[in-house]
Image (cartoon, rainbow, N blue to C red):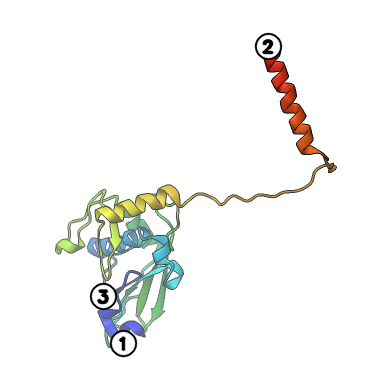
Amino acid sequence: DHVVAVGDEAETTYLEVKSSLDLSSKAGVAKVAKFLLGAANRRPREAARHFHGYAVLVIGAQKGSTPGVPRGVEAHELEDRLRPYLGAQFPAFEFGGIGVGDDREVLFVIAQPPQDGQPIFPCHKSFQGDDRRDSLEDGAVYVRGTSNTRPARAGELHALVERARGGGRAPINLDVEILGSIGRVDGVDELLERLYEFEEEEFSKQH
């Protein structure tokens, strides 16, 4: 409803909108891959402010209407087409759909919330599209901008390195319990003083 109300203005760091996309074409698959790469390279604290950290690509909706895309897109087939771009270690993602007719539906590609301790997720395969903005480069790191997915800048790369380096440490939990009897020692100060004197005497004798 929000996308239909405002169209492309709905796009943010956690939401991207495509009025139509041919998921059987290389260009369509590359656009989905680019979105997923950018969503995976977000900073956890910033991502958690919206949608509990999830990011969503809406396919088949625009301002004023929901034309949808043809039904029949199989999730496992799309995953197989995306995997060369994403790599084997890429986090899981989900697909969903809402029917808008007998043979059409609006698709949702849902990216998981980023986590502290995750590595940087680079692109694993190049693609040259008709529009330069749709191209992908092998080894490039993509991030989500305000309303688009683009190559990471130096500061963003540094933040992702910090995400991988420092955020993944598990918290330390200490359990303290009594395993034996408890004894009280009286006159601790006097006892320590006598020990100091004894050590000093022994040292003097050795000297």
User: Closer to us: mark 2 or mark 3?
Assistant: 2
Mark 1 lies on residue: 5
Residue count near mark 1 (Cα–Cα under 10 Å), binned few <14, some 14–19, many ≥20: few
Amino acid type indicated by mark 3: Ser
Amino acid type indicated by mark 2: Gln
78 is higher (above) or lower (below) than 190? below
Q: Position of residue 21 (x, y in %)?
A: 26, 71
SS at mark 1 in the image: helix
Q: Position of residue 177 (x, y in %)?
A: 76, 48
Instruction: Report the number of discs.
Output: 3
Q: Quadrant of residue 51?
A: bottom left
Q: For residue 206, which numbered disc appears in the image? A: 2
Q: Residue at x 69, y 50 (%)?
A: 175
Mark 3 lies on residue: 20
Q: Residue at x 26, y 61 (%)?
A: 30
> As rendered, which of 50 and 166 lies closer to the eye?
166
Locate residue 131 relative to residue 139 in the image: left or right: left
Locate residue 117 relative to residue 203 in the image: left or right: left
Q: Position of residue 94 (x, y in %)?
A: 43, 65
- Discs 1, 3 touching: Cβ within 8 Å: no
User: Closer to us: mark 1 or mark 3?
Assistant: 1
For the residues marked 2 and 1, what is the alpha-carbon distance in whole angstroms?
92 Å
SS at mark 3 in the image: loop
